[in-house]
Amino acid sequence: MSKQDDLLDPDFEENIGNFGQGQQLPNATATLVLGICSIVGCWLWGVPGLICGIIALSLHGKDKKMYATAPRKYETSFKNAKAGFVCAIIGTSLSAITFLFIVIALASGPGTMRF
């Protein structure tokens, strides 16, 4: 390639050493782990699942903005971040339902709650 082609491709120097491989998004693995923890945490009164799910959703938002700047560079790790996002939505929803059920059961009185 000529020098002019190198100037037209702003990512040329960054991709020389890792041709064919993408770079990792900084929070992709954390999003996936927290998304899975939110599903597991929904059975523990809902609170840990809500906390992990909300953190995973906010981390995914940061990664999504970074992915929008250079999609080809972050393509492989964005799949992990997307999977974590889906797990976080499922875990947050289940945790919210569990938490609301427990709050309603406690508010209705101690005689009506039988496990």
Image (cartoon, helix red, strand yellow):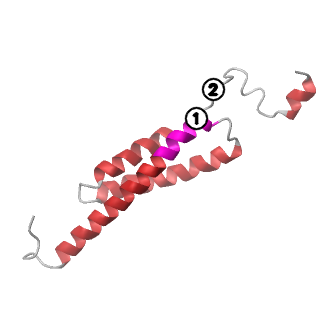
User: Mark 2 = which residue?
Assistant: 21
Q: Secondary structure at mark 1?
A: helix
Q: Is residue 82 left or right of residue 104?
A: right
Q: Main secondary structure of the magenta part?
A: helix
Crowding at dot 1, Cα within 10 Å, few <14 / some 14-19 / many 20+, comes out as some
Q: Earlier in the sequence, mark 2 or mark 1?
A: 2
> Residue drawn at (23%, 75%), measured in percent from left and top?
104
Circles 2 and 1: CB atoms closer than 8 Å: yes
Up the image or down, 113 lies above or below 91; here it is below
**Residue 26 rendering spot, x and y as whole percentages:** 55, 39
User: Mark 1 = which residue?
Assistant: 76
Amino acid type, label 1:
Thr
Q: Quadrant of residue 114?
A: bottom left
Q: Which mark is residue 115?
A: none
What are the residue bounds of the magenta stretch?
A: 74-83
Q: Secondary structure at mark 2?
A: loop
- The residue closer to the viewer here, 83 or 42, is 83
**Residue 63 rendering spot, x and y as whole percentages:** 58, 46
Q: Is residue 3 left or right of residue 14?
A: right
> Residue drawn at (63%, 50%), measured in percent from left and top?
65
Q: Quadrant of residue 12?
A: top right
Amino acid type, label 2:
Gln
What's the CA distance linking mark 2 and mark 1?
Answer: 8 Å
**Residue 89 rendering spot, x and y as whole percentages:** 43, 56
Up the image or down, 100 lies above or below 18; here it is below
Q: Is residue 59 visible?
A: yes
Q: Quadrant of residue 23?
A: top right
**Residue 44 rendering spot, x and y as whole percentages:** 23, 55
**Does the magenta segment cover residue 84?**
no
> Residue drawn at (58%, 35%), measured in percent from left and top?
76
Crowding at dot 2, Cα within 10 Å, few <14 / some 14-19 / many 20+, comes out as few
Locate the N terminus and report the quarter of the image it occupies: top right
